[in-house]
Image (cartoon, grey):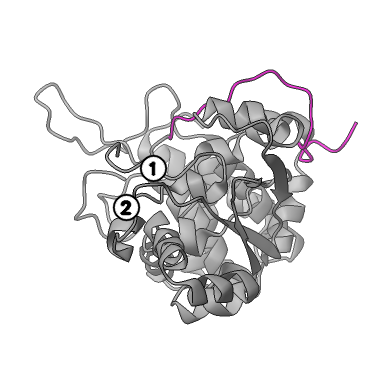
Amino acid sequence: MPAVHDRGGWPTDDSIDREEHEWADWERQTQSFRTVLDSKGFMNVDELRRGIESIDPAEYETSTYFERWSASIETMLVEKGVLTIKEIDDRAKALRDRWGYPS
Amino acid sequence: MSEDKDRGGFFDTGWRPSGDVHRDEDGRPHDHPGVREDVGLGVRASRALAMHELLVEKGVIGEGEVDEVIEAVSKRVPSNGATLVAKAWSDPEFRTKLLEHPKETVIESGFVPEHNADIIVLENTPEVQHMVVCTLCSCYPTQLLGPPPDWYKSFSYRSRAVTEPRAVMSEFGLELDEKTEVRVVDSNSELRFLVIPRRPDGTDGWSEEQLATLVNRNSMIGVSAATEPGTD
C-alpha cells in the first residue's frame, strides 16, 4: 500500500463532493500563521508537507484539511524547540476553558 | 467569512474561532465563540490557536502579522487567472509568451507565486484536454486562482483524477469528445499548473473584459469548459 497521503489511483467509488464549506476564522488564521512562520524561517512548505505526511494514518483519514496543518505546525515547532507540547497543551486547555468548550 | 466584518485582530474579544455567527432567537449575534453546533471547536483548531497566541506572547511574531497575511490572501481570486486567459485568447503574442515563459509572464502581470514555485501553462484544444490534480495534497496556483476548492483537496478527487479523469469531468458537466486525448498533470510544491480552456464559439470581437467573465475557475483546472456565452 502507498503511504496514506499518496492518494493518486486509490480505489474508490466515492463521488466528488463539490459543495464548499465556509472557512472558519481559525482555518484562515492557521493558513496565514503558517505563512508568517515560513517568512521567519520556522517552517517552509516542504516541512509543512513532511509534517502532514507524518501524521498517524488514522488521524490523517479523519481530520480536516487545516486540522492536518495544525498537526504539522505543531510537529515542526516542537521539533525545533520553539514550543513544548506541554505549553501547547496548557494553552489549548486555557483557550477551551475561556470559550466554554469541554477540554 | 463571518458576518462580523468589524472584528479586529485575534485578541479582540469579538474574535471567533469559527466563521459561523451564533444568533439568539431574535436573530442577534451573541458573543460566545460561534462554533458550529455539530462540529464544535476541534482539538487541532484549539491547538493551532494556542500556538499562535503563545508565539505572539513570546514576541516571536507580531500581533497583527497574521491578520496582514489574511488580508493579502484575500486578494488571490480566480479573476486573476481569468484576466490572463482572456488576454491569451485575445492577443496571440501574449498567448505565446504565456505558454513559453509562463513564470516570467505571470509575474510581469503582477501575480507573484507563493514559495517562488514554478508554473506551467497548458492550453486545451479539441485534440488535447489537460486536467490538474495534486495527488499528494493540494498544490495549486493560488496567486491566480485563490485557495483551492474543497473538492480539489478531497480524497476522491485526488484518487480518481488519475484513474478515471473522463468520469470526473463528466461529474463536473463536461462530456469530452472520445477522440480528445486527456492529459492529467500532478502538481507539487515546486510546480503549479494553469489551464487555458478552449475559447467558446460566438465570442468573436469580444473585449478581454467580456471574455474574462466566461473563464470560470474550474475551466482553469481543466475539469470544466469555459462558460458558454449567455449561460452564465
Q: Secondary structure at mark 1?
A: loop
Task: Provide the major secondary structure of the magenta segment.
Answer: loop
Say whether residue B53 is magenta. no
**Is B10 left, or right, of B159 in this rendering?**
left
The answer to whether A43 is drawn above or below residue A25 in the figure is: below
Q: Residue at x 47, y 29 (%)?
A: A102
Q: Secondary structure at mark 2?
A: loop
Q: Position of residue B112 (x, y in %)?
A: 51, 74
Q: Would you say residue B53 is visible in this rendering?
A: no
Residue B69: quarter of image: bottom left
| Number of the label disc, if any, that sits on residue B227 | 1
What residue span does the magenta drawing correspond to? A1-20
Q: Residue furthest top?
A: A13
**Is A84 left, or right, of B68 in this rendering?**
right
Q: Residue furthest right?
A: A1
Q: Quadrant of the C terminus of chain B?
A: top left
Under mark 2, the amino acid is: Thr
Q: Would you say residue A23 is visible in this rendering?
A: yes
Q: Position of residue A39 (x, y in %)?
A: 57, 74
